[in-house]
Image (cartoon, rainbow, N blue to C red):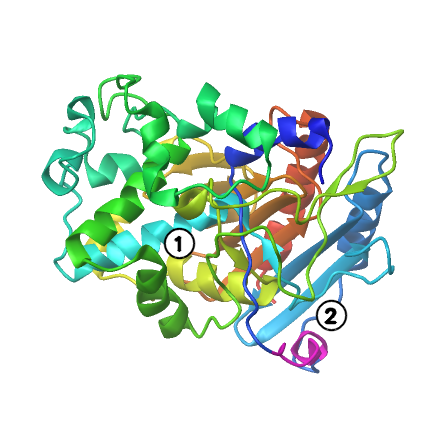
Amino acid sequence: MPTRASVRRFRTGLSAAALAAAALGSLLPPAQAADAPAGPARDERLQRELDRLVAQDDGPPGVIAVLTRGDRTRVYTAGVGDLATGRPPHLDDHMRIASIAKAFSGAVALRLVDRGALSLDDSIGEVLPDQPEAWHAVTLRQLLQHTSGLPDFSAAPRFLEILQADPRHVFDSRTLLDFVADEPLLFRPGSLYEYSNSDNIAVALMAEAVTGRRYEDLLKELVYRPLGLRRTSLPQGYRLPRPFLHGYDVAPPAAPEDVSEAVGTSGVWASGGIVSTPRELGAFIRAYGGPALLSRKTRKEQLAFRPGDSSEPAGPGTNAAGLALFQYTTRCGVLYGHTGNFPGYTQLAAATPDGTRSLTFSINTQTSKGNKPALLARLRTVQEDFACALLKDR
């Protein structure tokens, strides 16, 4: 079971979310594709940066960064994915992708927009009339861009009290907004930006309401199957399928604590409950960050970015917020993606606007602006160097 310190950090982790697991059958063969002759030459400078990252006292025990350019993939790893065995991180390790799950809810909602089942101007009052009347004017567009003003259920005292008493408590994911049902909006919808886990819970509930289907089934139909994602899931419990990238609470001088399965994920659901692998996360972000999943009209709406509004934690370069997608303007060019953090994990997935190249960057400890900000600053620097390597014309 987790220590009190690691549970206290769960609230921060929710700001970039959580994940879950499910046994998904036998693994793909080891990552031979990463070492195929077609792959680009290894950049030793990038490798040294990862080595330095894991060598920091409060750094992650391990890191895996995956650069994909067309049919060429290069995998960089440093440190270990499991301290008990010394096993390095692997391309097909399951892991908690944290708030990158919000991009998946965005994919579901925007594909329903393309099908005419939803409109970006549909409001909570129209689709979810049983939600508090004070929230009824909030639109799907505002939920996806975190300009809704919905209070964050993951900050509610009663929610945190339950979690503190039992980190593996099984919540009814579809009633998470009840924790803040008596609270007014934080601001007039559309007037400000405030990252909130409540937003994507509402998005999933809207998707269910207009289709009459469970959100988990919509994920399978609209995202997993079209993209061939066989090892990506949204479970309710705390278990991870094997093998997995172990996540750690790193708080020197104490030894790292394995918190991979310390916290259940029913309390984050569509805002952060997904488990995936580096390989499949890259496939998703190339499709969602690129033009493959959405019509031209809907993608134009998705890419209406608000300058200066950051993902949580902030991604590399200068951030701007679109609809369940962020723009990262680095010194070498632009990527579209999402980040996330949860006890034991910090994640980045980003792709070029044409969807032909992607970067996934996973470390097995948590960092955010409220938790190890110096580590986050170093991480963002390294991520930008990897982004530049991705954007090189070679």
Kind of residue indicated by mark 1: Phe
Task: Name the spot of residue 46 as percent of width and height, x first.
Answer: 75, 53
Q: Assign a secondary structure to mark 2.
A: loop
18 shown above or below 72: above
Q: Quadrant of residue 134?
A: top left
Q: Is residue 33 magenta?
A: yes
Q: Nearer the viewer, residue 175 or 115?
A: 175
Q: Is residue 163 magenta?
A: no
N-term-proximal mark, 1 vs 2:
2
Query: For mark 2, what is the residue?
Result: 41
Which range of residues does the magenta coloring cover?
26-35
Label for residue 211?
Answer: none
- Report how far apart the C-alphas of labels 1 and 2 lie in the structure: 32 Å
Is residue 227 left or right of 263 when viewed as pictured? left
Is residue 291 left or right of 377 when viewed as pictured? left
Residue at figure coordinates x 59%, y 47% from the top left: 347
Q: Nearer the viewer, residue 329 or 313?
A: 313
Residue at figure coordinates x 55%, y 37% from the top left: 317
Task: Name the spot of residue 4 as percent of width and height, x first.
Answer: 70, 27
Q: Quadrant of residue 307?
A: top left
Label for residue 104?
Answer: 1
Kind of residue indicated by mark 2: Ala
Q: Are marks 1 and 2 in contact (CB under 8 Å)?
A: no
Residue 12 appears in view: no
Q: Nearer the viewer, mark 1 or mark 2?
A: 1
Residue at figure coordinates x 68%, y 74% from the top left: 34
